[in-house]
């Protein structure tokens, strides 16, 4: 249990460093930035932003995209999810 907690802390710290490195305050802002990057056609940036995230946050981002698809009828979350699945 202690190992799992320290692993999560490490992932959290890494994710927050990524968030702060882009002058964001929240993980959701980082997720939104990935989505906007896809909308603007910056595919390589999307891949970099995604692969830089710790594994647990990649999973969280996939859930975030699934929620976006439920809320919106645009194709951007679907296209982004498809792009990232192809990368994995």
Image (tube, grey):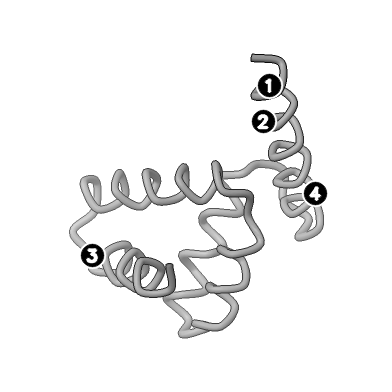
How far apart marks 3 and 1 lie (CA) works out to 37 Å
Instruction: Check disc 4 and report its element: helix, strand or loop.
Output: helix
Of labels 3 and 1, earlier in sequence is 1
Q: Earlier in the sequence, mark 4 or mark 2?
A: 2
For residue 8, the mark is 2
* Residue at the disc numbered 3: 74
**Residue at (71% x, 23% y) in the render:** 3
Mark 4 → mark 2, Cα distance in angstroms? 14 Å
Labels 2 and 1 touching (C-beta < 8 A): yes
Is the C-beta separation of discs 2 and 3 under 8 Å? no
Residue 85, picture quadrant:
bottom left
Instruction: Give the foreground label among 3 and 1.
Output: 1
Q: Which residue is mark 4?
A: 17
Marks 1 and 4: which is nearer the front?
1
Residue 62: percent from the left, percent from the top? Answer: 39, 51
For discs 2 and 3, the disc positioned in front in the rendered view? 2
Question: Which residue shows up at 43% across the image and 67% down it?
Answer: 88
Q: Are marks 3 and 1 in contact (CB under 8 Å)?
A: no
Which tag, 1 or 4, sits closer to the chain's start?
Answer: 1
- In the rendered image, the quadrant that contains the N terminus is top right
Instruction: Tell us which disc is closer to us: 4 or 2.
Output: 2
Q: Secondary structure at mark 3?
A: loop
């Amino acid at each position: 249990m202690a190992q799992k907690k320290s692993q999560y802390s490490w992932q959290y710290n890494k994710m927050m460093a990524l968030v702060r490195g882009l002058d964001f305050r929240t993980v959701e802002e980082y997720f939104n930035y990935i989505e906007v990057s896809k909308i603007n056609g910056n595919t390589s940036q999307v891949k970099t932003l995604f692969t830089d995230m710790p594994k647990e946050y990649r999973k969280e981002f996939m859930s975030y995209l699934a929620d976006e698809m439920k809320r919106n009828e645009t194709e951007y979350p679907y296209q982004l999810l498809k792009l990232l699945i192809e990368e994995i």
